[in-house]
Image (cartoon, rainbow, N blue to C red):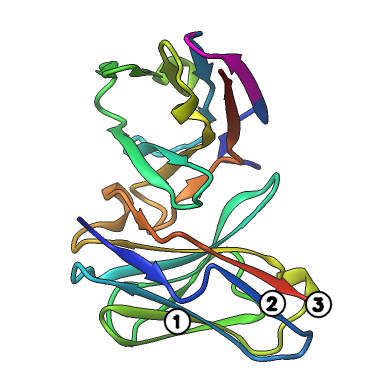
Amino acid sequence: DVKVTQSSRYLVKRTGEKVFLECVQDMDHENMFWYRQDPGLGLRLIYFSYDVKMKEKGDIPEGYSVSREKKERFSLILESASTNQTSMYLCASTPRGTIRNNEQFFGPGTRLTVL
Amino acid sequence: AQKVTQAQTEISVVEKEDVTLDCVYETRDTTYYLFWYKQPPSGELVFLIRRNSFDEQNEISGRYSWNFQKSTSSFNFTITASQVVDSAVYFCALSEANTGNQFYFGTGTSLTVIP
């Protein structure tokens, strides 16, 4: 079974802090994604990566950056956390091949609260 | 404009009732893919089904069935004889062949099955 893990289930940070959310998958998937989930808005793509050191912006990249130094790990970085970044963050991965027709395997999510 | 619309925000049914979750999508591509995911209270999205635009056959998997109708741009999901374990948020998603590697998620339908 594919396993996607996220470093924390719950995280509380203060405004202005630098925040790292870590995601690790154990199935050698090339493609990894970061989403945020907000009530009434569904899932929105922040960034995705299709290979080590490669990244592409999604719908809402502002205020975020990412790092993919190793194939299994995809990190989301909030350079200076703000209250409007309070949300549920979901990581996902898919195997090699076209992203658009592969199901995505999701981690359990990190609920981030910025005070 | 929303590419995937799930008009039902919340649904409650009594155990053993049938329930249909609606999904309407919007695309100009002739090749596209539709997905349903389940998000139980644990938070992790679980893939349920993928359907490509060339395959309008309806599908049944146990108590789950999906009705794909291109004429109405709908991909509805029916749970027969609902159970408490079906309580979750369900997301419909769309990806398009010609617009990159984005997944467009609906806003989700929260289903509560009352024992």
The residue sitting at 77% across, 70% down in the picture is A84
Work out how far the residue at label 3 is from the one at label 2, CA to CA, in angstroms: 7 Å
Q: Are marks 1 and 2 on the same chain?
A: yes
Q: Nearer the viewer, residue A39 or B22?
A: A39
Looking at marks 1 and 2 on the same chain, the residue that comes earlier in the sequence is marked by 2
For residue B106, the mark is: none
The C terminus of chain B, quarter of image:
top right
Q: Secondary structure at mark 1?
A: strand
Q: Are marks 3 and 1 on the same chain?
A: yes
Dot 1: chain letter: A
For mark 2, what is the residue? Answer: A12
The label nearer to you, 3 versus 1, is 3
The label nearer to you, 1 versus 2, is 2
Q: Are marks 1 and 2 in contact (CB under 8 Å)?
A: no
Q: Are marks 3 and 2 on the same chain?
A: yes
Give the residue type at disc 1.
Ser
For mark 3, what is the residue? Answer: A115
For mark 1, what is the residue? Answer: A75
Label 2 CA crowd tier, 10 Å (few <14, some 14–19, many 20+): few
Q: Which residues are magenta?
A: B11-16
Q: Is residue B32 visible?
A: no
Give the residue type at disc 2.
Val
Work out how far the residue at label 3 is from the one at label 1, CA to CA, in angstroms: 22 Å
Q: Secondary structure at mark 3?
A: loop
